[in-house]
Structure formats: C-alpha cells, structure tokens
Image (cartoon, coloured by chain):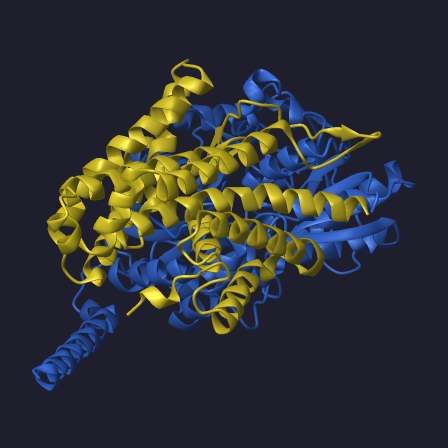
C-alpha cells in the first residue's frame, strides 16, 4: 500500500543524486586558465609558477602490470628531486605527481582528468601503457597539454599531425621487432618462429616489425588478453606448431607466466622477449619461489634473448649507471636501484633537457616546439638518438640485441638504429657520451 | 592432437579450481541462503597468511594448515561481527554488506601485504607428466588440486545428506523461526556455515595460488568464473558445482586455445545466459518446487 509513495521517494532521491553529480562534474570541468590572469611574473602557462613547474603521470602501481613498472615513477621522482636540490631548471623546481591507473584504461581517463583539471599540470611526462595511454590521447591533445615521452613503444605516439602534443620516448615496438627479426634471420635462419603477443598495439607493432624480416619463418602467432592469467592454451598452441624460437611482446608478469606454463609442458624453445618484458631481476624474483627450490632463481629466464637501449643496473662501471646510483642513494626511497628506476630517471633527464630548451618562460606550445627543433640533437643516457623533428615525434631509434645471463646481460651484436616502415637497419657507431659532471643536462634555450 | 590434449587437461585443472570456489559458494548458500561476494577476498586474505608463513621459513604444509584454520576463524568472525546485524533483514542488505567486505579486505591486503605480484610456491612438482615421450599439461600439482576438490565435494554431500548437523544447518537457512522453535540454535548454525564456507574458500585460494602469481586481486577472475560454475550447477548441489566448474574450465580453455583469449570472458557470459535461459535453476537443480 505504501509502495507508490516509496517509489516516488526513490525517484526523487535518484533525481537529487543525478543533479548533484551534474553540478559536481561541472565544477570539476571549470577551466583553470581563467584564474591565471593576475598571476605574477614567471607564471608563463598552466602549471608553471615563478618557482615551480608541475608535471604529472599515470602508472600501474597495482594490478597485473605493476611489477616493475610501478618502480618507474620512483626513479623519475628521485631524479627530479636531485635536480631540484641542485637549483632546478631556470630557477624553478619540478613538482611531480603520479597516480595509479592499475593498467586499466577507464582509470587512466579518470586520473588524467584529475591531473589536468584538478592538479593543473603543465605537462604529462611518461604516462605508461599502450591501452591505457591511448584512452587519454585525444583528451590531452584536445586540452593542449604536452604529452611527453609516453612509456610505451607503440607507434600511436608518433602522429604529429593528429596528436601534435604527444611524443614517444623509448624505441617503438616496430623498430625493436625489426632489429630482433633481422637478428633471428641472420643467426637462426632455419628456425621455426612463434610469436607470443599482447593483444593490442603493443603486440601488433612488434609483429609488424618482426614480420618484415622473418615472415616466412613464423609458424604461429598467439595473443593473450592482458588480465587473463591462464595462458596454457596459447603456449600449447605454439608448442603444437613446432616453434623453436618464441618472440614475446609481453609485459614482465606474462614473461613469468609464459616460463611457468612452458615448464609445465616441458617446452624449451629459445625465448626472445621484447625489452619491456624481460628485466632479469624482476622476472627472476617473480619466478624465484616455485617448486620448493626445484627451479632456482633466474635460471628459467637465463639464456633468453632481449634488447637494450639504456645501460643497465648491472653495468656498474658505466658512468650513467654511476650517476643513477648516486641519485638514487641521495634521493631514492625504499629499495634498490633497478632497471625500471633507471628508465624513470632517464625519462626525467630527457624532460629536464626539454624544459631547459623551452627557455626561462616555458609555455606548453613552447616546449613542443623546442623538442621539434632540437630533440634530434639531444644526447643522454640512451645509446641512440631520438627521432624528434617537426615531422616526427618518434622516440629512440634503435636497440642492441643481448642475451640474459644471471642478473645482467651479454651483448650479442652492436647497437643498431633504424626507422619505421622499410628503412634499413644500420649500425650506430657514435660513441655513447658520458653524463655531464654534475649530472644535470645543460641545453641552451631555443629561439 | 597434442594441442587438443594439453588444452583439455589445462581446462580440467583450471576447472577444478573454479569448482573448488563454486563449492564454497554452494556451502554458504545452503547454510545461510545468501551469496557471499566477499568469498574471494577472504580466500585471498588467508592465502596471504600462508605466504607470510612460508616466507618466514615455515613449510608449505604449515602455511596450508594455518590458512585453513585462519579461514575458519575469519568466516566465524565475519558472521558474528559483520553479518549478524543485517541477518534476518532483506537478503539484499546482506549481499551488499558482503560486497563492501570484498572491497575492504582487498584494500587491507594491499596495505598489509603490498599490491605487487608475488610468486606462491607449490608443494608438488610443476613439470607435466611424461606419457610415451611427450610431456602433457598435467602436473602432480593438478592431481592434488583435483583430489582436494573431490574430497571436499564428497565431504559436503555427506555433511548435508547424512549428518544431523547438516540438517540443522539447512533448517536454519530455510526457516529461522521454525528451526528455532524446533530447538535448533540458529545463530550457532549460521556462524558454523560461514566458518565452513570460508575454509573451503581458503582451500580454493591456496589451490589457485599454488605455482602461480598472487596479488590482492588475483581471485577476481576466479570469483566471476566460480559464480558462473555455481549457478550452472544450480547453487544447491555440490556435485553440480563441480560439474559446473569443469564445464566452465573446459569451455574457456577451448575458447582461449582455438578462438582467442580475448573471447574468454565473453564466452563465460554467453554460457551463463544460455544455461539460465534453458534451465533457469541451473543444470543440476531439483529444487524449483521449494521456491514458493
């Protein structure tokens, strides 16, 4: 009897709730620029004040992609703090905000909204992931936020016409796939090759690169959906196809899972993993506890082939690694220096270069223009140069092929560079310059 | 052929895990008439307890036993402290409280144990058996998983069908008033139902974790497929839950192996909808007449 009344109550309640949501979302959407008019000298753009520049990023701090990748922002933070402690860039300190998206594109949209609209960042630096970052690509470009050095090797970041604010950073998966493909063609010309691919642009781009050289050797290409941890059927299919070499374009937890599944099947192909999925320390740690000591630490991944474009943590004599160690010791948080932290620091180093090039009054357009003009000449922790220009927002141009041995790696060939499409692969002979003595780049302002 | 065999065996092993989880759901449904969405989170929590012990140098079996005991205590505690206030009210209230518990436990585990992936050891070998020169995707650990599931299933059947305790638990779940009038201590039965279900859930958590990677959300996929398995089996019958689990495990393994791993969740949904359309009370249910 009281039903109609209760229903009306519910409807009214729902309306109130909807109204509240609408009002609050409008509030969140209010553009920050309006309030900037009276800002004092030095506040040249959103996120820039007289003595700070605020940048942001999204990373998987939890979930399936968190192992390893969650360490990247801690490395970047340590390097920014090191720069801040040494006077900052043009007198400004860098504020770095990173948020967890759990490698879930829906979360990425939400945290990016927060970063841009609420934290009012000047630029996005190093947002991680192909599926995740593609969800915010249009938003960042629409808002005119510089979207620098995406932590992913997808080709999506190199579309300067469509996405003028977005820049890649690491060697893209096609370039990496090409160099791996050529290595297999030259060194294992008769091997049957299987591909183990993440089912998105990551796997697709890598496959494209590899197929450019060894299309006739590939006998199977299996894809896994990130989040589905049962990859038994995929590995069984590769085994059934008789693959003797497996090239994996996958994230580190899937490297561990693929090793584990292959163990179950007693399947021992030559594994080749993309750089992003192969960190020996991390994969070794993930695999360390299995079978009560029957499988010892890194032994499963030992002997696998991968690629490198930065000096790793094991190369403790390298001047860059020495710099990162010094930075981490002084400004790092808990834990040791790892390759992922070095990756974050290297990205942060590149951002400092870009911010220096943007001059003492940095603007969002200014930093993009500066990168297009001098980005190709910047030299830093990577073995190879960037491909930045007005027509290209592609990141590093090459890698070297290495074999995992213990916690470190052994070179299998020289550093090689190439470009997308049918560009040739050539050896990169320029000597890798050490970092500046104070560990902070010194790039002259452009224009 | 070898691929078919391996995909099938992998599906069976995976299905046994879904079955273990579905058994826990069946148990709590028969003992309390609610669906516990926090089951997976509770299992995850006790699995982490085992991991902490194993890491501190205890044997696998110590961790195993402590996790099961922890499940017993956690189940009873949750019933007494969290569920008791909403029992007897609308069923929806209880279900929503379990959802809240699910989120809370996951967050707590991330704070206590960290949100990163960790490997969880297995008590038996993870290399497949060799049959006639080829290695098949069936490991000593798979045997352990399937054996445990069968034992639990038989135990549940025996509990509900042959024991006085099982009868009293069912009576309290169906009609608290009548059961109370007949001298059944309903409160105690509900606590016991939760405790038992949590033990079975903990077992499922341990079986899934063994020789795999764990993180606070590692049960999420299993929760979904375990629910599908339990609903397939009709939510009432332990044997139905096991059959449902195996069906789901096999079907998803074939879908993943022959159609593509991106279709797995979709396939689970399609199976669920198809079964509910044809047999709304599940494949193995004979209790339609009880729902008055």
Horizontal placement of B198 versus A38: left or right? right
Spot occupied by residue A70 in the image (x, y as percentages of width and height): 43, 40
Spot occupied by residue B273 in the image (x, y as percentages of width and height): 49, 69
Answer above or below: position of A355 versus A390.
Answer: above
Answer above or below: position of A104 versus A266.
Answer: below
Q: Please identify the quadrant where the N terminus of chain A is shown.
A: bottom left
The residue under the point 16% across, 82% down is: A11
The residue under the point 44% across, 15% down is: B59
Chain B on-screen colour: yellow
Chain A on-screen colour: blue
Q: How many marks?
A: 0
Horizontal placement of A345 versus B133: left or right? left
Spot occupied by residue A390 in the image (x, y as percentages of width and height): 58, 65
Q: Nearer the viewer, residue A432 or A18?
A: A18
Can you name the residue that lies furthest to the right here?
A: A190
The residue under the point 55% across, 73% down is: A162
Q: Nearer the viewer, residue A274 or A156?
A: A274
Q: Nearer the viewer, residue A213 or B173?
A: B173
Q: Nearer the viewer, residue B59 or B284?
A: B284
Q: Is residue A258 visible?
A: yes
Can you name the residue that lies furthest to the top here?
A: B57
Horizontal placement of A99 versus B185: left or right? right
Spot occupied by residue B89 in the image (x, y as percentages of width and height): 14, 60
Q: Is residue A442 visible?
A: no
Horizontal placement of A293 versus A404: left or right? left
- Examine the image and state in which quarter residue A404 appears: top right
- Examine the image and state in which quarter residue A391 appears: bottom right
Answer above or below: position of B183 versus B124.
Answer: below
């Amino acid at each position: 009897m009281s039903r109609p009344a209760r229903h009306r109550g519910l409807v009214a309640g729902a309306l109130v709730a909807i109204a509240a949501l609408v009002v609050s979302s409008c509030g969140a959407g209010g553009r920050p620029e309006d309030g900037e008019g009276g800002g004092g000298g030095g506040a040249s753009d959103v996120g820039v004040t007289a003595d700070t520049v605020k940048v942001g990023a999204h990373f998987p701090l939890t979930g399936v992609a968190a192992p390893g990748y969650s360490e990247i922002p801690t490395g970047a933070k340590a390097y920014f703090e090191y720069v801040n402690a040494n006077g900052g860039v043009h007198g400004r300190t860098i504020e770095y905000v990173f948020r967890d998206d759990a490698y879930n594109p829906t979360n990425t949209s939400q945290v990016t909204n927060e970063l841009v609209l609420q934290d009012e960042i000047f630029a996005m630096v190093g947002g991680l992931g192909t599926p995740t970052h593609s969800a915010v690509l249009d938003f960042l470009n629409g808002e005119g936020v510089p979207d620098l050095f995406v932590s992913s090797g997808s080709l999506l970041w190199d579309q300067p016409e469509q996405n003028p604010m977005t820049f890649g950073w690491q060697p893209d998966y096609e370039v990496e796939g090409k160099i791996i493909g050529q290595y297999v063609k030259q060194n294992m010309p008769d091997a049957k090759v299987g591909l183990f691919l993440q089912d998105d642009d990551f796997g697709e781009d890598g496959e494209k690169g590899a197929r450019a050289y060894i299309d006739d050797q590939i006998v199977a290409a299996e894809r896994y959906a990130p989040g589905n941890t049962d990859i038994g059927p995929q590995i069984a299919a590769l085994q059934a196809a008789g693959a003797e070499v497996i090239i994996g374009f996958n994230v580190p937890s899937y490297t561990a899972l693929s090793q584990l599944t292959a163990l179950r099947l007693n399947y021992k192909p030559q594994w080749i993993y993309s750089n992003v999925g192969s960190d020996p320390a991390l994969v070794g740690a993930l695999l360390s506890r299995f079978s009560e000591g029957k499988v010892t630490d890194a032994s499963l991944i030992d002997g696998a082939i991968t690629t490198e474009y930065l000096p790793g943590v094991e190369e403790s004599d390298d001047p860059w690694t020495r710099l990162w160690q010094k930075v981490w010791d002084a400004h790092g948080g808990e834990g040791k220096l790892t390759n992922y932290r070095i990756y974050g620091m290297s990205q942060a180093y590149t951002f400092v270069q870009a911010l220096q090039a943007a001059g003492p009054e940095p603007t969002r357009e200014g930093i993009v223009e500066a990168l297009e003009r001098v980005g190709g000449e910047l030299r830093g922790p990577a073995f190879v140069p960037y491909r930045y220009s007005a027509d290209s927002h592609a990141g590093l141009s090459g890698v070297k092929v290495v074999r995992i041995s213990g916690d470190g790696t052994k070179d299998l060939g020289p550093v090689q560079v190439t470009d997308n499409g049918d560009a040739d692969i050539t050896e990169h002979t320029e000597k890798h310059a050490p970092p500046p003595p104070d560990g902070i780049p010194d790039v002259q302002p452009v224009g | 052929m070898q691929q078919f065999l391996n995909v099938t065996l992998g599906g069976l092993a995976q299905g046994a895990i879904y079955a273990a989880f579905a058994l826990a759901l069946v148990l709590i449904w028969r003992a309390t008439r609610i669906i516990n969405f926090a089951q997976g989170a509770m299992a995850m929590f006790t699995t982490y307890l085992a991991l902490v012990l194993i890491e501190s140098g205890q044997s696998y079996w110590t961790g195993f036993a402590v996790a099961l005991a922890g499940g017993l205590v956690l189940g009873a505690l949750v019933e007494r402290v969290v569920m008791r206030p909403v029992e007897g009210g609308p069923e929806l209230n209880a279900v929503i409280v379990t959802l809240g518990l699910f989120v809370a436990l996951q967050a707590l585990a991330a704070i206590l144990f960290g949100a990163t992936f960790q490997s969880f050891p297995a008590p038996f070998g993870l290399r497949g058996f060799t049959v006639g020169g080829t290695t098949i995707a069936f490991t000593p650990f798979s045997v352990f998983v399937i054996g445990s599931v069968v034992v639990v299933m038989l135990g549940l059947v025996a509990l509900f069908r042959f024991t006085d305790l099982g009868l009293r638990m069912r009576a309290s779940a169906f009609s608290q008033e009548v059961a109370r009038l007949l001298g059944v201590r309903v409160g105690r039965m509900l606590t016991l139902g939760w405790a038992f279900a949590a033990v079975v859930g903990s077992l499922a958590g341990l079986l899934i974790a063994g020789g795999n990677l764990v993180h606070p959300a590692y049960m999420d996929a299993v929760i979904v497929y375990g629910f599908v398995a339990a609903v397939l089996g009709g939510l009432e019958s332990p044997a139905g839950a096991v059959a449902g689990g195996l069906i789901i495990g096999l079907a998803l393994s074939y879908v993943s192996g022959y159609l593509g791993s991106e279709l797995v969740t979709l396939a689970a949904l399609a199976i669920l909808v198809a079964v509910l359309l044809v047999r709304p009370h599940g494949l193995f249910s004979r209790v339609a007449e009880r729902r008055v």
